């Protein structure tokens, strides 16, 4: 082989290596691009999430948001989902109780209510704060119904917009009965249980009179607890609540609620903050801290990629019906929730 042939073969070899290198580089870029995009999305999303801001001013009023359906914690997915995470909110209130600079709290309520246990936990946490002589003022904005009102009733004073949706004082448990549909298509549901009432909420069979009575008694017990909270917080007798429109589950506007003594004043968040400052005796010298959600990278990654992808769980949304969707996903739980 002469020198020219050798040079030609060398050029061809280098060319092949070049093409191979370009192919490897393209494959590498294709592999890492989704990861890079995910990181960018995390950064962008994190930049849009407010973190708790610590202000060193000696007189602070903390504004805490209770927004969305009240649940013990948010397992629904990406940030911005319509869940008021009680675990997170209670952590915020615990921090406030230990911070001598915070002189008052304003709860900004935008919620249709929520799960009974989560609502009561938040209510009791508010009482603990008040026992530390920290005023807690409720500010109802768009909606503070059912469990939202339960929480507000535990505050020192309640402000509402004149068009706020509130009230809905009551409790419910919900299930779906589909046995008629199964009968039509020739399908039967079988349950092997240790007792006749173990499957009282199963949809494949009619509800027995005994099961219905059990459910009614439980609802009545929890409703009584709601009535007691409202009676104590609003200085209204239990009989007046139960035997009037106040306690029959209906909703009211802010103006109607004022007439029924369910709220103290019509006003805005600014009005509630001003009242909180006056109550704490700091009206001439204070600053406001808006506390929202702190999310770590692990939580952010889980929310972006989706909890369902990690667990294999498939969630089906009902557009325009968030309350019903939560009830469907938590069948068997009791709710202070506006239907």
Image (cartoon, rainbow, N blue to C red):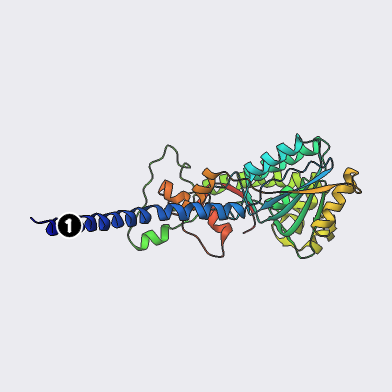
Q: Which residue is mark 1?
A: 7
**Quadrant the C terminus occupies:** bottom right
Question: In the shown orientation, is residue 176 left or right of residue 293?
Answer: left
Quarter assignment of residue 322: bottom right
Question: In the shown orientation, is residue 198 left or right of residue 70?
Answer: left
> Is label 1 in a helix, a strand or a loop?
helix
Give the answer, above or below, for where 126 lies relative to 146: above
Q: How many marks?
A: 1
Location of residue 14 in the rendering, given as x and y in whole percent from the top left corner = 23, 55
Asked whether residue 179 is in view, the answer is yes
Location of residue 264 in the rendering, given as x and y in whole percent from the top left corner = 85, 54
Q: In this view of the protein, which residue sits in the foreground, 289 or 55? A: 55
**Quadrant the N terminus occupies:** bottom left
Q: In this view of the protein, which residue sits in the foreground, 29 or 321? A: 29
Farthest residue to the left: give it. Answer: 1
Question: In the shown orientation, is residue 240 left or right of residue 278?
Answer: left
Badge 1 local density, few (<14 within 10 Å), some, or many (20+)?
Answer: few
Asked whether residue 206 is in view, the answer is no
Farthest residue to the front: give it. Answer: 3
Location of residue 160 in the rendering, given as x and y in whole percent from the top left corner = 79, 58
Residue at image x 79%, y 57%? Answer: 269
Quarter assignment of residue 162: bottom right
Location of residue 147 in the rendering, given as x and y in whole percent from the top left corner = 68, 50
Residue at image x 49%, y 51%? Answer: 39
């Amino acid at each position: 082989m002469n020198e020219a042939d050798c040079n030609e073969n060398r050029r061809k070899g280098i060319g092949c290596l070049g093409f191979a290198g370009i192919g490897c580089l393209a494959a590498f870029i294709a592999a890492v691009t989704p990861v890079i995009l995910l990181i960018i999305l995390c950064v962008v999303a994190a930049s849009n999430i407010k973190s708790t801001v610590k202000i060193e001013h000696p007189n602070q009023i903390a504004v805490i948001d209770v927004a969305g359906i009240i649940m013990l914690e948010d397992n629904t997915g990406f940030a911005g989902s319509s869940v008021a995470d009680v675990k997170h909110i209670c952590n915020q209130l615990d921090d406030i109780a230990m911070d001598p600079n915070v002189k008052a709290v304003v709860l900004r309520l935008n919620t249709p209510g929520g799960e009974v246990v989560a609502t009561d936990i938040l209510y009791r946490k508010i009482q603990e704060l008040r026992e530390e002589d920290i005023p807690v003022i409720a500010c109802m904005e768009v909606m503070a119904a059912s469990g939202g009102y339960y929480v507000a009733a535990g505050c020192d004073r309640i402000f509402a917009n004149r068009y706020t949706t509130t009230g809905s004082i009551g409790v419910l448990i919900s299930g779906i009965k589909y046995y008629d549909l199964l009968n039509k298509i020739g399908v039967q549901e079988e349950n092997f249980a240790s007792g006749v009432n173990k499957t009282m909420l199963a949809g494949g069979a009619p509800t027995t009179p005994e099961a219905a009575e059990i459910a009614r008694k439980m609802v009545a017990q929890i409703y009584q607890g709601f009535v007691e909270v409202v009676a104590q917080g609003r200085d209204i007798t239990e009989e007046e609540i139960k035997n009037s429109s106040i306690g029959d589950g209906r909703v009211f506007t802010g103006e109607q609620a004022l007439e029924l003594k369910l709220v103290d004043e019509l006003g805005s968040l600014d009005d509630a903050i001003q009242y909180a400052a006056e109550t704490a005796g700091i009206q001439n010298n204070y600053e406001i801290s808006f506390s929202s959600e702190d999310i770590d990278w692990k939580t952010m990654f889980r929310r972006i990629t989706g909890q369902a992808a990690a667990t294999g769980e498939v969630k089906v949304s009902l557009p325009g019906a968030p309350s019903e969707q939560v009830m469907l996903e938590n069948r068997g739980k009791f709710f202070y929730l506006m239907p």
